[in-house]
Image: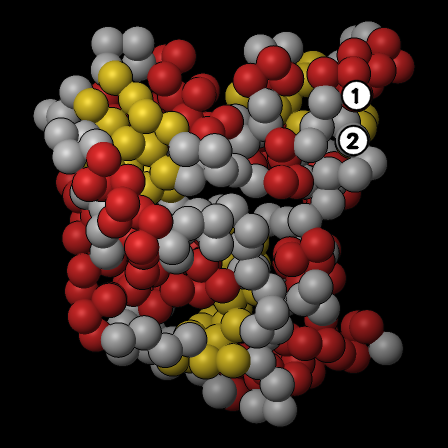
Amino acid sequence: MLKEMQEEILRLKKEKNVCILAHCYQTHDILEIADYIGDSFGLAQKAAQTDCEKVIMCGVRFMAETVKILSPKKRIYLPRPEAGCPMAEQLDVDMLSQLKEMYKDYSVVAYINTTAELKTLCDVCVTSSSAIKIIKRMDADKILFIPDCNLGDYITKQIPEKTFKLINGGCPTHAKISKKEVEKAKAAHPNALLLMHPECRPEVVAMADFVGSTTEIMSYAGQNNAKEFIIGTENSIVQHLGIQYPEKMFYALSKDCVCHNMKITTIADVLHCLNGTDGEEILLDDSIIKDAKICIDEMLRLGK
């Protein structure tokens, strides 16, 4: 039945000129029918380069908003409207406005995992893979980084010449990974390299053999000559890597490192969204699209 459902999705997306994006944390059956797979910003860039009239984002709301910002003339859909991101929703416009008032001489750097509304108040946007390079190239010496304090801490350690203000926000899925879990995993798999996402807590990140974004972790695992890896990010990556590199061994650092917002989207939801019987179209005011794109454009300028 799954194969038939996937074949119907492939037929419909071609017939209706729809591009399907899948974040790496989606289940493998969704990855198999996607046009593009990757991290959130990379997916938004891919969608902008296509001539598809409609885009389905298999991920969470802020990701679909980013697609809309880069492709304002396309119709963007989220298969499950309730698929949100706790980190992206930790701050609102009023709270950020107050922070900007408190730190008037600081430039605001927004992690891509923020809402479109928050991006309208920020100077530069960054991804986990580009943050260090982008912030190093900024003229500003004082940085207010939102919203992830764990990623922020990792960045500050790489750029000690600048002054940072961090807020108490972050990814609850990555943040709950403990040092004790790392020690247990390393004891169980002494020959395995530990690959960590920088959204994890500082004491955990310090124990890693490699720190990087989700796609960087997957690339490192594929290119490295080691045969065993402990994966310190969302557990779907363990499955994806195991399928892609069956000759290697991949272990989940924590059985609890599961993003329930990502997992809420199913292959049936994608089919229903294509049929127009479910899902939500992402609609943003023109002013929000225009103002939110400023910090994204600055990221692209500094990243060249």
Which residue is drawn at the image coordinates 45% and 59% (left, top)?
A: 62
User: Looking at numbered disc 2 in the image, what kind of residue is underneath it?
Assistant: Ser
Is 188 left or right of 7, judged from the image as shown? right
Q: Is residue 70 above or below residue 10?
A: above
Label 2 with label 1: CB-CB less than 8 Å: yes
Kind of element beneath mark 2: loop
Residue 194 is drawn in which quadrant? top right
Q: Earlier in the sequence, mark 2 or mark 1?
A: 1
Is 303 left or right of 81, judged from the image as shown? left
* Label 1: few (<14), some (14–19) or many (≥20) C-alpha neighbours in 10 Å: some
Q: Is residue 179 above or below residue 280?
A: above
Q: Nearer the viewer, residue 94 or 50?
A: 94
Q: Nearer the viewer, residue 211 or 290?
A: 290
Residue 193 is drawn in which quadrant? top right
Q: Which residue is mark 1?
A: 181
Which residue is drawn at the image coordinates 38% and 28% (left, top)?
A: 166
* Label 2: few (<14), some (14–19) or many (≥20) C-alpha neighbours in 10 Å: many
Task: Look at the image and tell me in which quarter the C terminus lies.
Answer: top left
Instruction: Determine the CA span between mark 2 and mark 1.
Output: 7 Å
Q: Nearer the viewer, residue 219 or 111?
A: 111
Scheme of colours in the image: secondary structure
User: Looking at numbered disc 1 in the image, what kind of residue is underneath it?
Assistant: Glu
Q: Position of residue 242 (x, y in %)?
A: 77, 37
Which residue is drawn at the image coordinates 23% and 56% (left, top)?
A: 120
Residue 47 visible to an observer of this rendering: no
Q: Position of residue 80 (x, y in %)?
A: 61, 73
Q: Is residue 32 above or below residue 163?
A: below
Task: Look at the image and tell me in which quarter the N terminus lies.
Answer: bottom right
Label placed on residue 230: none
Q: Which residue is mark 2?
A: 254
Kind of element beneath mark 1: helix
